[in-house]
Amino acid sequence: MKKIIVLLTLFLNSLLVLAQNQDSLFIRSVFSNALTDNTSYENLRTLCKKIGGRIGGSPQAAKTVSWVEETLKKIGADTVYLQPCMVRNWKRGSKEICYATTAKNVKQKFDVCALGGSIGTGVNGIKAGIIEVKSLDELKLLGEEKIKGKIVFFNRPADPTLYNTFRAYGGAADQRFIGPSIAASYGAIASITRSITVVTHKYPHTGIMHYIDSLPKIPAFAISTIDADNLSTIINKDASVKVYLESTCYDMPDTISYNVIAELKGSEFPHEFIDIGAHMDAWDITEGAQDDGCGVVEMMDVIRMYKQLNYKPKHTIRVVEFMDEEMGQRGARVYAESVKKNMEKHIASIESDEGAFLPQGFSFESGDETVEKRFEQWKYLLMPYGLWNFHRGYSGVDISFMNDQKFPLIGLNNDSQRYFNYQHAATDVFESITLRELQLGTASIASLVYLIDKYGF
Ligand SMILES: [Zn+2]
């Protein structure tokens, strides 16, 4: 009897070793394929250079939908279809203007842009005194008496001492997101927010702002970090300085757009899905290479790679290219609703929206303890490729609308040091992408999807 148990254990162990060898060989082939192929890099070049900025509702966004659909068909996905969603249709209008005039009538120009969703000043602009604050609380201390009729200048920098720049961004975002409305509640007539980035440069970073319904709407701008410092110096020297602002942005009625969905059908469980997603829309003043064109082409490339490696997944791999992440996440909401309504069984949903920088691991939320255990088991397969950090944490904006579901949401985590040099600014161009880093992103996702497909959670 003892002998049988020993033999059985040996047999099972050898099976395990065989499976582990198979896994490590497959993952090796995924990385080799990615690092010797430039399809996604060339796809990204087309998206950035032939289409460019593509905010929801724009003709460029419509072009992107067609191009993504066509490209996924060419790659050989089994099914490609569009999922309609209504999106906000905000237009920037002409290039914004900002300058300060001192008491001695000296004019100084600043680099600004309207925040996404802002109303415009109109062609006659706004000229007023300005008051600098570092927080929303400071507005309360100053009160209506000091703020009324003025432009409020939010100038708290993203905290450069934080290692993770997403944390630094999050810590300053209130000034952009609800700052304008709170300023308006004290009688401000416009607002300027320091761009949320840890670098000092001349490029303003846009991004969505939100008007609180019960409060007056005022035009809202972002100023480059270097000009935020310059403006602050001027105000400190001369409190009587007047600032001129001009923007012509406006909203058109909501319009139809689409998520693009493509599937590689599962051989054993075609009705069980592993989602891999990114967002197609990007701010109009960018080419949307880092945010989030790279994610879009990475997900397409997983399909290309599996086909080339002749890997037939057991579950259906579903690429979801979302629309409207930047303005209102309408595409993500529609997709999450459809998953719920159709009672689809999903194994996991993975998002890539941290640019094309060196991948370091995955964060995960929801799901049960098995998820943590699985990552622990898979660590030794992924660590040789620089993937070492697996932790509970936020996964991504688009898939976050499925956080009431039982399956885990997973985000690809990249080195964050350079992301905010580019996000939402004119610096976010194709030339900022490094081919190898982009390909490592694709390979990281393809490897994880392989493991999830084989072992589940
Ligand atoms: Zn993004």
Image (tube, rainbow, N blue to C red):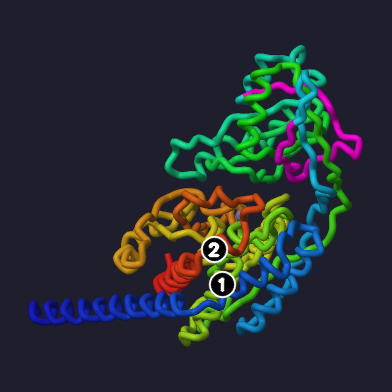
Reply yes or no: does residue 122 show up in magenta: yes
The image position of residue 360, as x and y in percent, is 40, 58
Q: Which residues are magenta?
A: 108-133
Asked if one can make out residue 126 in the rendered structure from this viewpoint, the answer is yes
Reply yes or no: does residue 132 show up in magenta: yes
The image position of residue 339, as x and y in percent, is 64, 63
User: Could you tell me which residue is drawn at 82 percent across and 53 percent down?
Assistant: 89
The reply to whether discs 2 and 1 touch (Cβ–Cβ < 8 Å) is yes
Residue 343 higher or lower than 122, as above or below: below
Give the quadrant of the C terminus. bottom left
Q: CA distance from mark 2 to mark 1?
A: 8 Å
Residue 179 higher or lower than 247, as above or below: above
Q: In the figure, is residue 435 to the left or right of 282?
A: left
Check disc 2 and report the residue beneath it.
433
The quadrant of the picture showing ligand 1 is bottom right
Q: Callout 2 environment at 10 Å: few (<14), some (14 to 19), or many (20+)?
A: some
Asked if one can make out residue 184 in the rendered structure from this viewpoint, the answer is no
Residue type (three-letter) at the residue carrying disc 2: Ile
Q: In the figure, is residue 447 to the left or right of 166?
A: left
Residue type (three-letter) at the residue carrying disc 1: Tyr
Residue found farthest to the left: 2
Q: Secondary structure at mark 2?
A: loop
Give the quadrant of the N terminus. bottom left
User: Could you tell me which residue is drawn at 75 percent across and 73 percent down?
Assistant: 66
